[in-house]
Amino acid sequence: MQASEVLRSLFGRGKHPAYQASERMGRNKRYINSVMAHGYVPKLDTMASIMDAIDYDLLVRSRQDGTEIIIDPPEE
């Protein structure tokens, strides 16, 4: 799954308004919507900032068969 698809999945549920997360990152309130709309691939540090803005953890784990990226939601 591409980064923009992950973002669409997370923000499409309506639980986390994209504009609020963008503002928490110090970006224009349309930043995340722009990433999703245009299919941009954010750098890993940008993706980490987006996840931090919605209280998710972004984990990167090296595996023998390749690198795995895990997005871990907060416990509710």
Image: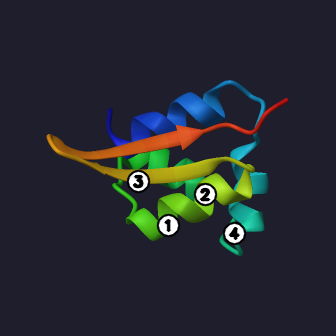
Q: Provide residue 72's location: percent of width, then percent of height.
A: 60, 39
Q: Provide residue 40's location: percent of width, then percent of height.
A: 35, 54
Q: How far apart, in angstroms, are the residues tagged by discs 3 and 1? A: 14 Å
Residue at screen point 60% across, 33% down: 10
Tell me the quarter of the picture where residue 65 sits: top left
Sequence-wise, the earlier of marks 1 and 4 is 4
Residue named by callout 4: 25
Residue at screen point 32% across, 32% down: 1
Residue at screen point 38% across, 48% down: 38
Left-right relation of 39 to 9: left
Sequence-wise, the earlier of marks 3 and 1 is 1
- For the residues labelled 4 and 2, say whether their Cβ atoms are less than 8 Å apart: yes
Q: Residues within 10 Å of mark 2 (few under 14, many from 20)?
A: many
Q: Secondary structure at mark 2?
A: helix
Q: How far apart, in angstroms, are the residues tagged by discs 2 and 1? A: 6 Å
- For the residues labelled 4 and 3, say whether their Cβ atoms are less than 8 Å apart: no
Q: Which mark is residue 60?
A: 3
Residue named by callout 1: 46
